[in-house]
Structures are given as C-alpha cells and as structure tokens.
Amino acid sequence: MSNRRLEVSGLSKTFGPARVLRGVGLGVERGELHGLVGQNGCGKSTLVKILTGVYRPDPGGSITVDGRPLGLPVRPAAQREAGVSVVHQNLGLVDDRTVWENVRLGRYRAGRVTRRIDRAHERAEAARVLARLGHPLDVDAPVGRLSAQDRAVAAIARAVQDHQPGSGLVIFDESTRALGREARARFYELVKSLIAEGTSVLLISHQLEEVVEVTDRVTVLRDGEVVAAGVRTAEVDEAEITRLMLGRHLVTHGRVAGHVRDELVADVRGLAAGPVSGFDLAVRRGEIVGLTGLVGSGFAEAAEAIAGARPAASGTMRVLGRELDLTRRRGSTQDFVAAGVAFVPERRLEEGLAGEMSVAENLTLPRVRGRGSALRTGTAWQREESAAMIAKLDIRPPNPQAPISTLSGGNQQKVLLGKWLAGSPDLLVLHEPTQAVDVGARHDIIDAVRRAAQDGCGVLLASIDPSDLAVLCDRVLVVRDGRVAARLEGELEPDAISRAVFGDGDGGDGGDGDAPGAPDVSGAPGANKTSDTSEAGERSGETVER
Amino acid sequence: MTDTELVQEGIAPPAAARPGGVIGALAKQIGSRYAVVAVWIAMIAAYSAAEPGTFFTTGTFQAIFDSQQTLVFLAMALLCTITVGEFVDLSVPSVYGFAATVLPVLAVEHGWPVWAASVAAVLGATLVGAINGFLVVKVGVNTIVVTLGMSTFMLGISLWISNMNTISGLPAGFDKIAVTDVGGLQISFYYGLLLAAAFAYVLWCTPLGRHMRFVGANREVSRLSGVRVDRIRFGAFVAAGALAGLGAVVGDAYFGGFNASSTSSLLLPVFASVFLGTAVVEPGRFNPVGTFIGIYFLSTGILGLQLLGLQEWISNVFYGGVLVTAVTISTLLRKRVV
C-alpha cells in the first residue's frame, strides 16, 4: 500500500443533489503508466480536480503519495512538494510567450530589490530540464512557433522540472487532443522514457486505442464509481474497456423493427462544415440515422450545421421540400424551428437549457411566440404541455416550476428532449443525447426517440457512443478525416461500430467505406433496410452483452 | 473482470422533497421575498419614533413619493438592458441628461413649440440608445466600454449645448403634465407606477418578456431555440434610450428645467435601486416590481436621515452602502435558491 506512488481511497464528491464520485479508489505504482478512462460525466475530471486541489472532496477519503498523506483539500504547494504535476488539456501553454517563460511559469526567481525576473537563471533552468528530457529546444522561441511535438515537450518539461529523476507523478489530462498521430507517437516515447526512469504517469484520455496501447494498467470509471480497478491492459482489449465504460445490466433495449417510410424528410447535399466536406445525407420519415467518428473527425460539426447551429462553408438542405440555407451565420434558428427541425445539443447547460429558468419555461420556449399572442403567453397550453412531457419522459421531480439547475443531469436531458419533442418535429438532430445520464434516464430517452421515429420523425443521431448507435439506428455513417469512411446498416453491433470508428484494418465491415461523393448513398440503404427488417421483425437485437 | 463487476448498483433517485414542511417553506419564501419591505416598514417606524413631529406627516409622505419619477424611468431603462443580459449600461443617466437638456434648449432658446422639443428630445435619446445597441450587439464592442464612453460623450455634448447653465423658462402649462394633483400625489408618480406595472406585465406575461428573460439567462440556448437574440438585445438598448428620453420630458416638466452638470449624481441611485430590486419579489433576479419598491425604500431612508439633521453627504453613504449590502444579500439568496 505505502509502496504505491499514488493511492486514492474512498473519495466522494457531491454537488447539490448529485453525487458525482462515490468512494473512488485508485492506485498507481512506481514507474507505472496508468490509464483512467470513462464516459463524459463519469467523474474523471472531478477526480483530477480533486487531485489538483480545485475541488474539496466530501469528508472521508484519502490521498497518499509515496505513503505520505496529502491533506484534503489538496493545496498546490503540498501537491508540488509531493511531486504531483499536471499537463492539462491542450497542454496549457501560452503561445506568444517563449519556451523558457512557459516552462518556468509559476517558479520565476526575481531579483531581491528590483523584483526583476532573473532571465539568465530561468533560461538555464529551462534548458537543463529540456536536456534532461533529451529534447533540447530553443528556449527563446515563442511556443506558438513550435511544432506540435515540441510544444508537448515544453509542457512535459514544465510538469517534470521539480521532480527528482525517477520520482513523482505526472497526470496527463486529455493532453494529446491537439496532437496529430505522428506527434502523438513521439509524445508517448517521451512519456515512456519518464516511466523508464521511475516516474509514474496517470493518463486520462478519450482515445481508448491509445490507452490500450501504451498503458500498463487501466482504471475505468462509470457514473462516479470504479467499475474496473487497475486492470492489466495486456488482458483486455478496446471493446472490453468500452463495455466497461458503458456497461449496464438493466437495459432491455433490443433493436426493434424500423419504421422507415418512403417520404424524404431531409435532403442534405454537398455539406462542408469544419473538417467535413462533400457530405450528403438523406433522412426519411421514421428513420434513425447515426453519425459518428472520432472526436475531431468532423461528424459533430456536420450535425450542428444540419441543425442550423453553426454556419456551413457550403451545402444545401431541403426539409420536406423547404429550402434552408446552411451557410448563413444566424442570430436565431427560427427558420429551422419553423421548418420542423429540432436540435438537442451536446452541452445541455450551455446550449440546451437555461439553468435558472423553470422546467415549464424551458420546455415551452420554442413555441411561446407561436402559441401565445403578442400580449399573452397563455397559461393553459403551457400547463398541458409541461404536464404531458413530464409524464411522458418521467421527469423528476414532476414539478414544472422547479428551476432546471436543481434537476439531476438525466432529468435535465429529458427536459431538453421534451422541449423539442413537444413541438412534433419532422427532423430531430440529437448530439450525444445520453451523455452523462444515468441508466434509467438513458432508457427513457432511447424510448422517447424511438417513439418519435415511429410517429414519423426523421432522426439524425450524432454520437460517439457505439451502444446508443447500435440500439437506435437504422444505419450509421462513420466519418473519418472529414469524409464518410464507412456505412454500417442492418444488424449493428457496437464493436463493429467502434472498429469502423477507429479505422482498424479488420473493422469497417458492413460499409463499403467508399465514395463519399456518391450522391445517392442513402436511397439504397434505406430501401435495403426496410426489406431487411420486415423479415426480422423482432431481431434478437441485444447489442451489448450485459 | 467478471460479468458481476458490470452490475451496477441502483442509482439513488434525486433528492425529491427538501426537509421542512410546506408552511415552513412558504414562510421562508415570503421571508426572502419581502424582507426588504419589512425593513422598509421598520425604518418608517424608527424614523417616526425619532422624529415624531416631522417624519410621519403628509408632507414627508409626499416628498418621498413625488420626487422619484425620473429615477423610476431611469431604473426601468437600465432594467431593459440588464434583463437581456447586458450587465452595465452606464450611459442611462447621461442619455437622460442629454434629452433633458435638448428639450429646454430647443423650446426656450430656439423657440420651438414645447411638444416638438419634447418629441425631439425623446427621439434623440432613442437614437443614442440605438447607437449603443448597434455598437454592442452588431459590432460586438464591450458594453462597459461603449456605454462609459457614450456616457461621457453625451454629458459633454449636454454641457456644451446648454453652455453649462441651468436652462429654465419652459412655457407655463407644460408643468401640468407632471405636476397635477391626483389623490394627494403628483400625476408623474402614477406614470412611474404604470411604467413599472407595464414592464412587469411584459416580462412575466408576454412571449416577448419570456424571450427577454431567456436571452438574459443564456444567449446560446435562446438562439438555438429560435429566439432572435440580437434583435431583442438591440431592442433593449433602443427601449432604454426611449425610456430615458421620456423620463427627461417628465423630469423637465416637473423641475421646470435642467442643469446638465447634475447628471452624474443620478448614476448611483439608478444602480442602487435596480440592484436592491433583486432582493425583492424574485430573490436574486432583476425585476421591475422589486426595483420600484427599492426606489422608494432608498428615498425613505435618505429623507429620514436628512430630517435627522444629516447633510448632503448622507445620500452618498446611504446609496453606496445599500447598493453593496443589497447585492451581497441577493447574491447569497441566489446561491441558496438556485
């Protein structure tokens, strides 16, 4: 126990009614590369914020480094003394400052009288650390002009400069997001050289592929609990970790017969948005189309452009014959809403709901002008609509006057979905609709989306969650490097979706991975699909073994 | 790594009801909503006890309720922009000062009919609001910078066109629109009352008000819900200018003229009453009814202190002190409520 570099035990954290961490434990050995993974909202970032002293944990937990307890809440000085440092998301560098300024930030030694920074000393110190890492850089170069890989070196140098070689713990919190594949390889070489010296590393990453490849052991968090503690990475694969991250035992959703009808709801052509270009999509009534890919592949931008939330570089869309301009930056999505397009955005409290307003006010917002008169919002329809949605989605507490911020994440997400479903949209664009919600809420959300499709709504589901996609979608488009790299349809398996997303050679089956330019991609699959489901009305469909 | 490890414990349902009975909760609600009103009544009682001969009289009562009309207009103007999330429109008093100067300058020095001068003053103020709105909403300049600059600029213009003099001598009869006795109070008091009531109605009962509050709460949420965010923000600046202009017409009629150099003394009372309003009716939120009550609360406090023999300086101490106290209290209330 005391042998470990980092030992976390019994750590809990409560925010208002939400318990985001429950008795979490984590052990990192000396000289170990330990991975920490989990879905968004599983408590990873809360754990890191406790480790770095941003949050104060609930009483009762403990954190020890090399056997010595770290006081809670963690104070920055104690953290540094214990040799724990963090490399933040996107490396946390200031681009227009030099390498030495960035590396030495927070440690500048100033002259006794003048309080001037002792430049010579700082430059020498920065150079010393870089030399120790075996990656000398020009310490006077502005960080912004460095290659991605050298930037990573500077960030690591800052993190390890106070460590005695072979001691300490470096936490990489989604540090590699901005790095390309090649830079990432070099980055991990450097990390491994730290490990070889005896320093420990806690790697937090969404890139499961990498986690499996580079770490010694991995800890999986789900809904604030450790579901797998320090599993040897050699003994698991990506699919297994994914299952651990998402795994649920009570979801009974199987696939059900599709309700795809012939009428086209939305027809998108030649869409270019973010990294995506030449993207075509046709959604039929009752059809649920999945859109997925790696973070940064562009699938999310495509969905947002289709919903009118962000301007596209080019592209046209017709919704039930009505032409909508995708390229305009709009001060309001009013025209999309009027055309029957609804958008459930990813970040529910930034883009979806106003936390300080009530459930009823949020639910009815898109229709308050249309259904009210200029002088009255009208109370009867609002009461009816909120009551109906609260009942339909089982929103708790069932109080339409409760401020959104007092609801749990899952119930907030239900309100967000209800806000749009109440308007009976023709095209429903969902972005990570089950992110950071508990099992029960996910169940209800999936049910509601499915019912909307049965009622004739066309659904576009943009998600990185393969089990959501597998359970809901009639077909899935996988975006890689801005192109549709694979199309999956028929019997969808989460593993197959994951493989297609990660683009491994053995995956990507089911889709022909071709011709992103082929204009009429969706006609054929749609038709296929209908014939295909009619014979298998209730396919087994358990898509995730639970 | 067995399947049993996948089994998840039941998730605790979200805390449904808070402990404490319904009546207790209701009492707490009323307590946090109307604490300021209680303090107000206590203050009146204390002053009446301290100054039995002078404070609790009709004259004092009229002095409190007849003197704050301009402040009501200005506070409502500030509320327009605050409601939609533009936190500090510092230019409201100067826009008022500008309109209040333009009116007598045109009517007295240039011989315009007084109604035409009034219309010109209101239009001028509205235009300044539109310029603010354009710079903040369409161009995206920081609100504080725009309104601070505009405030100083308009003050300078007002001082210039008035030659730094008090301009009076408005035609007889014009004052009737502000100074007509209705039930013991001047008619202009009722303008303020009506304005606050209308504002409250718009905010709470109309789709426009709902949209305004959502824009103030979260712009991106509103935009993605089909609310025309920029139009509403721009409209708020224009309305703020127009209200400041209307307030200037009422104020000129009431005072018979205006001295532009007194403009800056309006800034703190406006902010103090608007912020104090967040401690009334809707705890932690800006609202017109709370603001209206806040104005007369402050006016009562200052008049009482002056009757006790304290000098001019007391209004600075009182407004400033109450502003900080009120905002502190409403911040704490908000933390508890939300």
Image (spheres, helix red, strand yellow):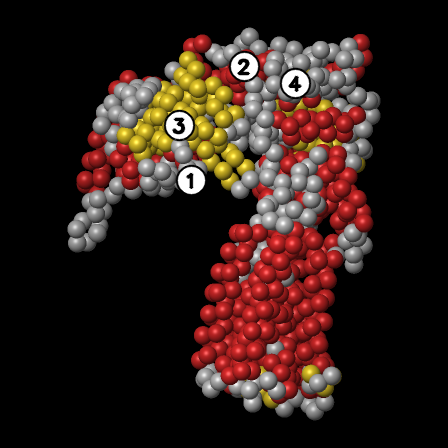
Q: Is residue B245 above or below residue A393?
A: below
Q: Is residue B56 above or below residue A171?
A: below
Which SS class for mark 2? helix
Three-letter residue code for mark 2: Thr
**In which chain is the residue bearing label 4?**
A
Which SS class for mark 1? loop
Which of the two labelled residues, at mark 3 and mark 4, occupies the earlier sequence position?
A: 3
Residue where numbered disc 4 is placed: A470
Does residue A112 appear to the left or right of A417 in the view shown? left
Q: Quadrant of residue A469?
A: top right
Is the residue at mark 2 from the same chain as the one at mark 4? Answer: no
Q: Nearer the viewer, mark 1 or mark 4?
A: 1
Query: What x and y, as percent, mark residue B211?
Result: 69, 52
Which residue is located at x 71 percent, y 85 percent? B184
Three-letter residue code for mark 4: Ala
How far separated are the C-alphas under marks 3 and 1?
Answer: 16 Å
